Structures are given as C-alpha cells and as structure tokens.
Image (cartoon, rainbow, N blue to C red):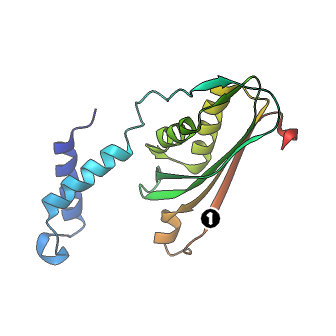
Amino acid sequence: MSDLLKAAQAYADFLRALGLNSSNAHINIEESAHHAAELMAAWMSGVDAVPPHLSLMPASEEGKVSLQDLPFYSFCGHHFVPFFGTVSIEYYPYRKIAGLGGFCRVIDHFSRRPQFQEYLCKQIATHLFEELSPKALRVKLNARQMCLELEGKGAGICVETVHILGDGSLF
C-alpha cells in the first residue's frame, strides 16, 4: 500500500536535492511532486497485485493464434526511467483458447512494477503458458529503453527479447 503524501514529499525533497526549486525550474515543486507520486503509484500497482486470469473457451487444436504489437509501458528497475514498446504473442492451442482482452491485462499487470525487459518477457510467457496450457507459446517484446536514450547512446534503438515455452519446433 503506497503512502502518496510521503511519496510526494520524498519526491519534492529529491528534486530540491538535485538543485531544483520553483524559481529556477519554473514549476511548482510541491504540485509536480504530487503528480509524480500519483503517476509512480499507478505504474507500480502490479508489485503486490494478483495476476489476472484469462477467460478460457474450448477450442479445436488447429492452427496458431497470433496477437501482434500489443503496447506496453514499464519502468526500468535499474534506472527507474520508462521503457516501452510492443508485445507479440503466438500460441498453438491445446483444447482451449483465451479471450483477447485477457492478454492485454496480463501484459499490463506484469509491466506495472520496476522491471527488466528480459524478466517481463519471461513473466508474461510463464503466466500465459500456465493459464493456457498450449502446445507451444512464444512471447516477443520489442522495446525502446529510455535509459539508453537519456544517456545519449542513440535514439530509437529497439531491444528484442523472446521467450518460448512448450514445443518450440512449432515456430
């Protein structure tokens, strides 16, 4: 459970420790700190939350199900700046398929915490595999890492991670 008042005060203290104040930054430090605390609390809401279940339906075992370019936003657990991009999910059903909205809820759940792209990819894949029990599942994340960009290492660099569970030869 977050304490927004404490978080806002700590954020204001953090900004002042960096040498910012309302006159040199042309912002209201207290107001900005409050907004930042609210945003960070929302972005970190997945830390203690229970992962969502998929809505499952019986299905034939024919063909592959593919969802492409589902957006996600997360926070780098190393620098605490955003990384964001898309998730693509492919699976070969075994007796059941899932409602499409559930995939977005799972992605959002695991994205809302301090995170590393490699772990995020694995967490999404593992949860979906446990829920679906497919023949095979592949999760691919393409993301821009703002820590790289803010350090001047190049704008628009995309990092790709892939996690495969089950019979990978199907892909």
Is 137 or 7 nearer to us in this picture?
137
Query: Vertical placement of 101 versus 149: above or below?
Result: above
| The C terminus, quarter of image | top right
Is 73 or 116 nearer to us in this picture?
73
Amino acid at the residue labelled 1? Cys
Q: Residue at x 47, y 53 (%)?
A: 73
Residue 7 in the figure: left or right of residue 170: left
Is 17 or 5 nearer to us in this picture?
5
Q: Position of residue 138 (x, y in %)?
A: 73, 42
| The N terminus, quarter of image | top left
Q: Position of residue 99 (x, y in %)?
A: 59, 33
Q: What is the total number of numbered labels drawn onto the structure image?
A: 1
Q: Residue at x 20, y 56 (%)?
A: 33
Query: Residue 156 is drawn in which quadrant?
Result: bottom right
Query: Residue 113 is drawn in which quadrant?
Result: top left
Q: Which residue is mark 1?
A: 158
* Circle 1: element type: strand
Q: Residue at x 65, y 37 (%)?
A: 125
Q: Residue at x 22, y 62 (%)?
A: 15
Q: Residues within 10 Å of mark 1 (few under 14, many from 20)?
A: few
Q: Position of residue 3 (x, y in %)?
A: 21, 38
